[in-house]
Image: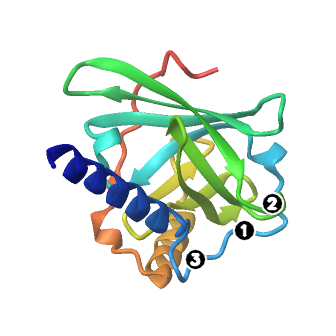
Amino acid sequence: MKNRIILIVIVCFVLLNSMTSCSSMPEKAQPVRQFDVNRYLGTWYEIARFDYYFEKNLDNAMAQYSLNADGNVEVVNSGYNFKKNKWVSVNGTAKFRGDKDAAALKVSFFGPFYAGYNVVALEDYKYALVAGKNLDYLWILSREKTIPEKVKQNFISKAQEIGYDTSKLIWVKQDKKSPFDK
């Protein structure tokens, strides 16, 4: 009987997870169109984010994107854990969810489990606003360790239009040279 209950709980978890993972973008968000993944490749510095357990206590966070042989995007996320005084990184893969001219991707750092990665605002491939699968995930990225105030305010307004509570943004320190920076 105990094994049967455990099996039912596992099945319910898998079903619930598969239903919620279908939602890959907040309802009011739209991915950037005419997206050129080749221009998006390279290093992006995290300017702001919502606080997530997988980025807890990280500053100097950055993401590096490159194409792999099968056309998917290789991802290396890194940052400095200021509580543990050490650099950390994690590798992942991003795949387009549909048309490659729409910036709607899914990314995985943990095997077969993917989450939404949606570029919803992009300025000259220098600054990006990235929405996750729901209103709990948001990033502001820049090719440089800073962002112009006007771009920052435009991205905050865009995020608020989508439904994000931008008062929860954490502004990331970018004051160290990363050993992962290419």
Horizontal and vertical percent for residue 46? 48, 45
Q: Answer with mark 2 or mark 3, whichever residue precedes in sequence.
A: 3
Amino acid of disc 2 = Phe
- Residue 34 sits in which quadrant? bottom right
Q: Residue at x 80, y 49 (%)?
A: 37
**Image quarter hosting the C terminus:** top right
- In the image, farthest residue toward the left: 2
Q: CA distance from mark 3 to mark 1?
A: 10 Å
Q: Secondary structure at mark 3?
A: loop
Name the residue beneath numbered marker 2: 35
Amino acid of disc 1 = Val
Horizontal and vertical percent for residue 95? 70, 47
Q: CA distance from mark 2 to mark 3?
A: 15 Å
Label 2 environment density (alpha carbons within 10 Å; few <14, some 14–19, many ≥20): some
Q: Residue at x 68, y 69 (%)?
A: 31
Q: Secondary structure at mark 1?
A: loop
Name the residue beneath numbered marker 1: 32
Q: Nearer the viewer, residue 74 or 87?
A: 74
For residue 162, say whether it is visible.
yes
Name the residue beneath numbered marker 3: 29
- Asked if the residues shown at circle 1 and circle 2 are in contact, with their CB atoms under 8 angstroms apart, the answer is yes
Residue 76 as seen in the image, left or right of residue 16: right
